[in-house]
Structures are given as structure tokens and as C-alpha cells.
Amino acid sequence: MNREMRRLQEREDRRLKQKRKKQQQQRKRRPQRGNEQLSMAQRLQRFIREVRAELKRVSWPSREQLIAFTAVTVITSTALTIYIFALDIFFKDGVLFFLGTS
């Protein structure tokens, strides 16, 4: 093995060793949650507290944005409904025409 490859291998070994060491330290720092037994009410309270905290971080749309997005959604849904309805009528009439029934 030449010198460059050996250095590359040593560098890779050091990197992996540091990564393993860091992972072990993180495991040691984590609190042990498996030992604590919480009642259903306590778990529900914790869940609600976490949900509230998460909802405070959400970037809610402004009133104008909400109205614009709602209008776009309603108009798009209506247009697609009319388009699919027209295709349905067209293909129904086409099939009935080819089958010879009116």
C-alpha cells in the first residue's frame, strides 16, 4: 500500500472513531425515559403542551392569503368538475352512438 493510500485509510479510521465516540457521548447524555411511568392524564397533558408549542411555531397565512387560496381552490375544483362532467357526457354519447342505441 503506498503512502497516500495509507494516509487516506488512517484519516478515514480517525473519522469513524470520532463519529463512534460522539454517538456514545450522545447516548450517555440522553435522559432515561423508559424508567418513568406516567399516567394517562400526564401523557395527555404532555401531548397537549407539545401540540400548543408546535402550533405557536406555525407560520399562519394572513386573512388576504386565506381568501385568495380559498378562491383559487374553489375555482379550480369547479373548473375540473365541469371539465370531467363534459368528458363523461361526451364519452357516454360516443359509446351509445357506436353501440347503435340512442
Image: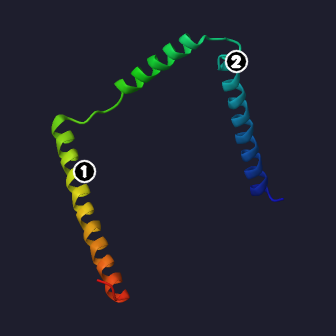
- Mark 1, residue position: 73
35, above or below 15, in the image: above
- Residue situated in front as seen by the camera: 63 or 40: 40
Given the image, on which type of amino acid does mark 1 rest? Thr
1, above or below 50, in the image: below
Furthest residue to the front? 101
The secondary element bearing badge 1 is classed as helix
Q: Position of residue 14 (x, y in %)?
A: 73, 40
Q: Position of residue 42 (x, y in %)?
A: 55, 11
Q: Is residue 82 left or right of residue 57?
A: left
- Place residue 25 in its image quadrant: top right
Furthest residue to the right? 1
Quarter holding the N terminus is bottom right
- Mark 2, residue position: 34
- Residue situated in front as seen by the camera: 79 or 28: 79
Residue at x-position 73% and y-position 52%: 8
Residue at x-position 70% and y-position 20%: 28
Graded by Cα atoms within 10 Å as few (under 14), some (14 to 19) or many (20 or more), the crowding at tag 2 reads few
Q: In this view, does 33 lie to the left or right of 3?
A: left
Residue at x-position 27% and y-position 67%: 85
Graded by Cα atoms within 10 Å as few (under 14), some (14 to 19) or many (20 or more), the crowding at tag 1 reads few
Quarter holding the C terminus is bottom left
Q: In this view, does 48 lie to the left or right of 15?
A: left
The secondary element bearing badge 2 is classed as loop
Given the image, on which type of amino acid does mark 2 rest? Gly
